[in-house]
Each structure stands twice: as structure tokens, then as C-alpha cells.
Image (cartoon, rainbow, N blue to C red):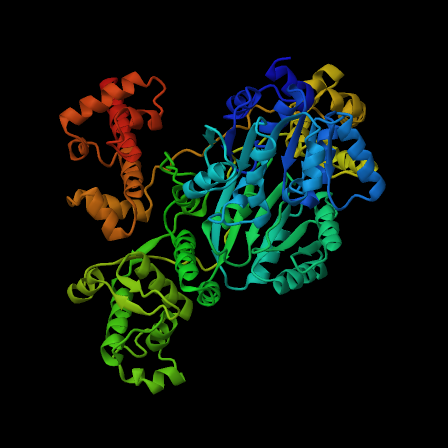
């Protein structure tokens, strides 16, 4: 049987997602494979499909015992013989499964690493025909990763016991250092390595100033009455109090953290998976492996300690590809809390943790595209001027002439250092600016400084934001160590002395609801969709499985879009395989027929694909500032340095200016005639114009931003010649 036929028969799809087919063919050829694919990218299929097409047993190693039952339920509902062994089974159930394994009744076995590596388990497994090992959450084997688990280390002994069995290692998040460590620890032999894009185009990223956090969270959830989500907190106490308060306010919620018993965690997680609970409040440190495809929002109530954890946790949203939201509530006090925890670590650990926290804070405070910032962290360039899927792209924050407040802040830092002989932290500087009457200020006579009280007109939060932005712009620097004292950089000192103009960003006072990204949206009959959801829920309860095991939201929306009337038409719906056709065609077709007796059939012309709103013709304040500097003769590098941006952001601003007709005669500022000829030849050779391929062909001499500029000028020239 060929790949597509097997895919359609068991999983109900007639095409693969990016990289899946290549990975599956390598796995079927018996090669070791490393797969880095974001959550929702279809990692599981990369070992599940080969397991169906090869003789023998595929052993799936997973650390998430609580999810094994649901994973196996989903496979069995699709007609795939799979099982699991873990501590939740009673003695009789466990014996029955062991017998089935020895008789070769299963194609897949899910097991935790600590159980697999028991000598008694390995001795039994030597009698089985092992087709392959699939190591899920493979980043857990690396101590450089964000979720290192010592029990994973023993997996490197698999090669000694099963030298001929191929291994496929899979993870959703890993830096280059972690990837190399995974390959080394698992002793992968000349592995084929696949790294998919880290981009999750259906997710919208937002950062909201944390002012009245509970009220903000409650309003956010209430405005999405049909959606379920996860709220990540920094402490167990917060998860408990939040879940209790939300429940009292009419939103069903349960906590999830390491302090609960195993049975309590399982109970709360199952309630969430089965849609009995809308919201789970979970600890950031403990994390949670959620296999629920239709999580529509992830809110970080507290600041994560690093971008890897943030990416992994936000990745729980929208695994089915439908539009979903990721919101971070951010405040300076959360940064201070993280610094306090870091100070308790050893100096070597603290140095790494501070650098990671700095990257996290940069993400929260950046004016650049948040998607671009995230992808750059993982070594990936985002080749678009705007993602149209984060707050900074959808509703760019306004800038203002911040020269006077910047002068006040820089002067205060400078005078405190001159008077005391050493620097002080951000909060102390802010207290001096606002004229606070604190013991620390009186003891050091900082109330005698000329800058004492000169900033009383601004709120404390505003001065803290200004201080952090000056840090980001490189005018102020923060000393390493637990006290994080401030001092001026040479650029900051020069700016203070010469009164150099400084552009700052206006703070957002309220959490406005950003326009929602439509990437991944499937237009359908919403009333029918809700009725199909109700039917799915009833069928799931009858079978004692989570609702998504029956059908995903994507499949239901396709039904509510196409109104299948016969088993043949039902079979064409994505996600309907042979087993589900037999089990569920009749009730769903009956529901659709009944609906159409009282409602009209609607027609949908949109394809529900990655639609993006048209580029705004009017430049925003930040783009105009870049344009003004460029027209004054400043180079791209100089503008980026002065404004605290990376070059690609400045290129994006200039591209918007070119496309809006503001820079018709500036081509020679970017390219010499020889460069134009070289780039044009490369575009001719790459017929589809893929910028990554063009960049590679040119030996990476040009930024993707420069190539987009070239392409825009070329399009402008063609338009002029056709007039």
C-alpha cells in the first residue's frame, strides 16, 4: 500500500504537511532520523505511519504518562492496534497487554523511559520484533535543554541492546546546541536531520501591560465564551487562587501543578481534555503536556524565565491549525521576581539565567515583530515585512520625542553614580526621579540631587518603562550580579552631553483586543458547527474518550462547510478514515440532514487559507521616522543602531515606504549596477522567487531584507514601463 492510501485509510487525509513525507520515507528505509517540528506540525504521524507500514513493533518513548491513554485511544478509534504500559494500569490489565505484546497483536507501544530501561523490561523486549524506537520529547535528554529529565539519559543504552533497530528522535523545541546533544546522547548513526520552520502562523502573539491582572484575565476569558485555554502562573499558590476565583466568577477552571497528587492531576487534565473544564491554571516551572488540539488561548499570567519555555508553552495553543491567541501579561515587578530567584543560583547558573531572562524581557518590550523575534532566537529568519499576527504588526505602538524624559533619566543615573561612587538599581533611580521619601534615599542624601523629584509628573510604571527602553537602546547598561546597578554607556553619556534626540515608545494603558489573525481560519456554518460539537461531545462521553478523539474541530468545520449528505461525501472530509467512516458516518450525516430541514444551506467562497490583510498604504510613526532619517542620508546600519532595531526591521520600514511610493528614486542608495545585475540573474535562476533560495545562490552576501527591497524596486519599474 502506498503512503497516501495508508494516510487516507487510517487518518483521513490525502496530503502530507511539509517535511512529513520525506521523514516517513527515511524512517521506512530504516534510517536514524532527527525531527525538530513545532507543536501542531504533525510530528506524531512521522512515526505512526511507518509503524503501520513496517512489520514489527514501534516502541514510543514518552515522559507524559498522563497522556498515554488519550494518545492510544485516538489511535484505536482510527483502527490502529496500539497500547501503553504504565503505573495507571491494574495488574490484570497489565498482564493482558503483556500477552498481546508477546503475541504480536500491537503495532505501537507507548512507554515511559524509566520503565523501558528496566532490565526486566529489556529482557522481555529482546523477544519482540522491534521495527523502530520513537523518542518523543527528545530534548529531555539534553542538560542544555529547558526540560532536562535524568531518566532520559539511560536511553543511550538502547543501542547496546538493540543495535539494528532504527531510532527517530522528535522534539518541538531545541536550540542548535541541544540538537547536537540529542544526536550524540542517543548515538544516532548518520541521521537524516529535519528542522521545520518554528513559525506557527495561526497563532497571534500579544504582550499586555500588567495593571490589574485578574480583572484583565477575567475580561479576556469572558469575551471568548466558547473557547478553552491554559493560564500559566509562576507559583502553585497562584494556580490555586486563580482557579478558585475564576470558578467563583462562573468560569470552570482547575489548577495543575506538581503539588497535586498524581490522581488529582490526571483528574483535572482529563476534565480539561473532555471539555468539562474550560480553563486550566498551570505552573510555568512544572509545565504540562497537553494533547488537546483545540486550545484556543494561552495566557502567561506571569513572566516565563526564558524564550524556550515561552515558545513551548504558547505552542499548546491551536495545534489543530485554527486561529488561536497567546497573551503575555508583563510588568517590571515580574522581572524583579525572576532576578530574585536567579540570585539564589550558583554564579555559573545565574549567568546563563540572566542572559535568558534578558532575551525574554527583550521579547516583551520590543517594538519589532514578535514573531520575528521568536524565530530569530531559534536561528530562523522571518522573510516578511509584517507577520500580521502580533500586536506590534497589527496595531503598531506610537512613538514620541522622548528626549526630555531620556535626559532626565540619564542625568539621574549619572548624578547618583557621581555622588555615591557606585550605581543603583532601576527602582531606586525611579524613586529619586519621582521624589519618593524613602529611607534609602535619605540615608544616601539622594534627596539633595538636582534630579530629585524632576519626574514627579510621570507614573512609576512609565519611568520604569523608559528606563528599560533606554537599556534596550544601549544608552544605559546594567551591571551583572544580584544588585543589577545602572550606569551610562559611552553612547548614553554622549547623548546626555549633546542632548541628542531620543525616540521612545508610547505605553499601552489598556489591553485592547487586537485584530485577530485569520491564518488557518475555515469559514463555515457556525450554527451547524456548534450542533456538531454537541453531537461529538455525546459520542465521546459514551465511549469515555476526549472529544477530539472522535473528530477535531477542523474536521467538524469542514463538515459544517460542505454539508456531506452520503457516506461517499462524508469520506471526502479531511480527518475521516475508514474506521471513523464506519463508526460515525451515520450519526453525523443524520445531524446534518436534520439541520438542513429547518436551515438553509450556505455557500462559502473563501478557501480559509493563509489570508493576510492588504498592506497599509499609510506609514506608521515608526516607519516615518526611519524614512525621515534615510532621506537625510543616514545609512541603514546607522538608523538601526540609533533606533535600537536590527537591520531587517529597518529594511521592512523602507520596503513599506517603497511600496507606498515614498522612495521612487532611491534605488542607487541600496545597490550598485553590478549588484543589481548579480541579484537579477539569481532571481531568474530561482523561478519561484523563493528568497531563502535566492540568498543561498548569492552566497548569503545579501540580507533577505535587501532582496525584498530589490524585488519591490523591480516591480515598481515594471509598473512604470507598462503605463
Q: How many marks?
A: 0
> Residue 686 appears at what percent x and percent y?
32, 19
| Image quadrant assignment for residue 582 | top right
Answer left or right for 409 relative to 321. Answer: left
| Image quadrant assignment for residue 723 | top left
Q: Name above or below for residue 113 compared with residue 405.
A: above
Foreground residue, 159 or 468?
Answer: 159
Answer left or right for 519 relative to 229. Answer: left
Foreground residue, 137 or 222?
Answer: 137
Foreground residue, 516 or 160?
Answer: 160
Q: Name above or below for residue 193 compared with residue 174.
A: above
Outermost residue on the top side: it is 1
> Residue 377 appears at what percent x and percent y?
40, 45
Quadrant location, the N terminus = top right
> Residue 49 appears at what percent x and percent y?
62, 24
> Residue 222 appears at what percent x and percent y?
64, 52
Q: Is residue 456 visible?
A: no
Q: Is residue 333 visible?
A: yes
Q: Residue at x 83, y 43 (%)?
A: 91
Q: Residue at x 76, y 29 (%)?
A: 102
Q: Name above or below for residue 422 compared with residue 564.
A: below
Amino acid at each position: 500500500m502506498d503512503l497516501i492510501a495508508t494516510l487516507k485509510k487510517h487518518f483521513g487525509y490525502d496530503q502530507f504537511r511539509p517535511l512529513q513525507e520525506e521523514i516517513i520515507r527515511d524512517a521506512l528505509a530504516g534510517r536514524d532520523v532527527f525531527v525538530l517540528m513545532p507543536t501542531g506540525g504533525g510530528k506524531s504521524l512521522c512515526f505512526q505511519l511507518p509503524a503501520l507500514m513496517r512489520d514489527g513493533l514501534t516502541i514510543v518513548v514518552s515522559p507524559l504518562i498522563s497522556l498515554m491513554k488519550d494518545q492510544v485511544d485516538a489511535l484505536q478509534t482510527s483502527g490502529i492496534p496500539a497500547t501503553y504500559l504504565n503505573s495507571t494500569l491494574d495488574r490484570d490489565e497489565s498482564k493482558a497487554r503483556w500477552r498481546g505484546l508477546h503475541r504480536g497483536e500491537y503495532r505501537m507501544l507507548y512507554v515511559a523511559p524509566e520503565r523501558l530501561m528496566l532490565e526486566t523490561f529489556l529482557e522481555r523486549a529482546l523477544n519482540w520484533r522491534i521495527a523502530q524506537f520513537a523518542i518523543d520529547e527528545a530534548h529531555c535528554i539534553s542538560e542544555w535543554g529547558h526540560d532536562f529529565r535524568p531518566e532520559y539519559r539511560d536511553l543511550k543504552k538502547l543501542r547496546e541492546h538493540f543495535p539494528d533497530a532504527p531510532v527517530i528522535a522528535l522534539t518541538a523545541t531545541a536550540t542548535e546546541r541541544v540538537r547536537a546533544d540529542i544526536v550524540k546522547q542517543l548515538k544516532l548513526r548518520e541521521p537524516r536531520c529535519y528542522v521545520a520552520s518554528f513559525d506557527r502562523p495561526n497563532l497571534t502573539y500579544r504582550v499586555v501591560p500588567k495593571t490589574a491582572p485578574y480583572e484583565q484575565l477575567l475580561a479576556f476569558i469572558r469575551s471568548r465564551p466558547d473557547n478553552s485555554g491554559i493560564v500559566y502562573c509562576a507559583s502553585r499558590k497562584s494556580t490555586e487562587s486563580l482557579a478558585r476565583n475564576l470558578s467563583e466568577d462562573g468560569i470552570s477552571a482547575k489548577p495543575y501543578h506538581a503539588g497535586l497528587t498524581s490522581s488529582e492531576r490526571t483528574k483535572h487534565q482529563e476534565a480539561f481534555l473532555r471539555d468539562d473544564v474550560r480553563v486550566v491554571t498551570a505552573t510555568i516551572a512544572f509545565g504540562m503536556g497537553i494533547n488537546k488540539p483545540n486550545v484556543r488561548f494561552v495566557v502567561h499570567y506571569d513572566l516565563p524565565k526564558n524564550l524556550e519555555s515561552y515558545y513551548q508553552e504558547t505552542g499548546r495553543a491551536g495545534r489543530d491549525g485554527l486561529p488561536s491567541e497567546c497573551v503575555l501579561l508583563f510588568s517590571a515587578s515580574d522581572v524583579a521576581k525572576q532576578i530574585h530567584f536567579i540570585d539564589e543560583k550558583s554564579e555559573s547558573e545565574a549567568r546563563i539565567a540572566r542572559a535568558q531572562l534578558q532575551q525574554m524581557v527583550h521579547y516583551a518590550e520590543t517594538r519589532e515583530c514578535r514573531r520575528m523575534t521568536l524565530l530569530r532566537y531559534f536561528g530562523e529568519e522571518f522573510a516578511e515585512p509584517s507577520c500580521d499576527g502580533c500586536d506590534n504588526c497589527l496595531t503598531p505602538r506610537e512613538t514620541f520625542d522622548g528626549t526630555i524624559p531620556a535626559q532626565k533619566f540619564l542625568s539621574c543615573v549619572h548624578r547618583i553614580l557621581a555622588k555615591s561612587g557606585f550605581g543603583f538599581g532601576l527602582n531606586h533611580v525611579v524613586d529619586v526621579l519621582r521624589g519618593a521619601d524613602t529611607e534609602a534615599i535619605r540615608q544616601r542624601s539622594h534627596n539633595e540631587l538636582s534630579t530629585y523629584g524632576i519626574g514627579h509628573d510621570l507614573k512609576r510604571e512609565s519611568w520604569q518603562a523608559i528606563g528599560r527602553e533606554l537599556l534596550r537602546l544601549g544608552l544605559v547598561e546594567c551591571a551583572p550580579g544580584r544588585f543589577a546597578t545602572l550606569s551610562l554607556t559611552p553612547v548614553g553619556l554622549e547623548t546626555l552631553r549633546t542632548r541628542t534626540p531620543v525616540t521612545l515608545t508610547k505605553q499601552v494603558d489598556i489591553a485592547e483586543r487586537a485584530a485577530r489573525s485569520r491564518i488557518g481560519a475555515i469559514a463555515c456554518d457556525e450554527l451547524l458547527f456548534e450542533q456538531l460539537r454537541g453531537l461529538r461531545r455525546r459520542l465521546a462521553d459514551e465511549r469515555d474518550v476526549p472529544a477530539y478523539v472522535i473528530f477535531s474541530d477542523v474536521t467538524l468545520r469542514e463538515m459544517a462547510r460542505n454539508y456531506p449528505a452520503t457516506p461517499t461525501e462524508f469520506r471526502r472530509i479531511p480527518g475521516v478514515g475508514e474506521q471513523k467512516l464506519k463508526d460515525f458516518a451515520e450519526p453525523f450525516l443524520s445531524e446534518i440532514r436534520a439541520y438542513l430541514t429547518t436551515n438553509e444551506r450556505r455557500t462559502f467562497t473563501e478557501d480559509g487559507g493563509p489570508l493576510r490583510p492588504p498592506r497599509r498604504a499609510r506609514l506608521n510613526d515608526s516607519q516615518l521616522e526611519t524614512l525621515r532619517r534615510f532621506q537625510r542620508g543616514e545609512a541603514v546600519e546607522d538608523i538601526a543602531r540609533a533606533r535600537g532595531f536590527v537591520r531587517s526591521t529597518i529594511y521592512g520600514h523602507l520596503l513599506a515606504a517603497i511600496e507606498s511610493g515614498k522612495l521612487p528614486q532611491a534605488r542607487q542608495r541600496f545597490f550598485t549596477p553590478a549588484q543589481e545585475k548579480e541579484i537579477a540573474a539569481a532571481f531568474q535562476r530561482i523561478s519561484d522567487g523563493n528568497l531563502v533560495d535566492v540568498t543561498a545562490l548569492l552566497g548569503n552576501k545579501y540580507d533577505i531584507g535587501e532582496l525584498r527591497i530589490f524585488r519591490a524596486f523591480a516591480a515598481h519599474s515594471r509598473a512604470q514601463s507598462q503605463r
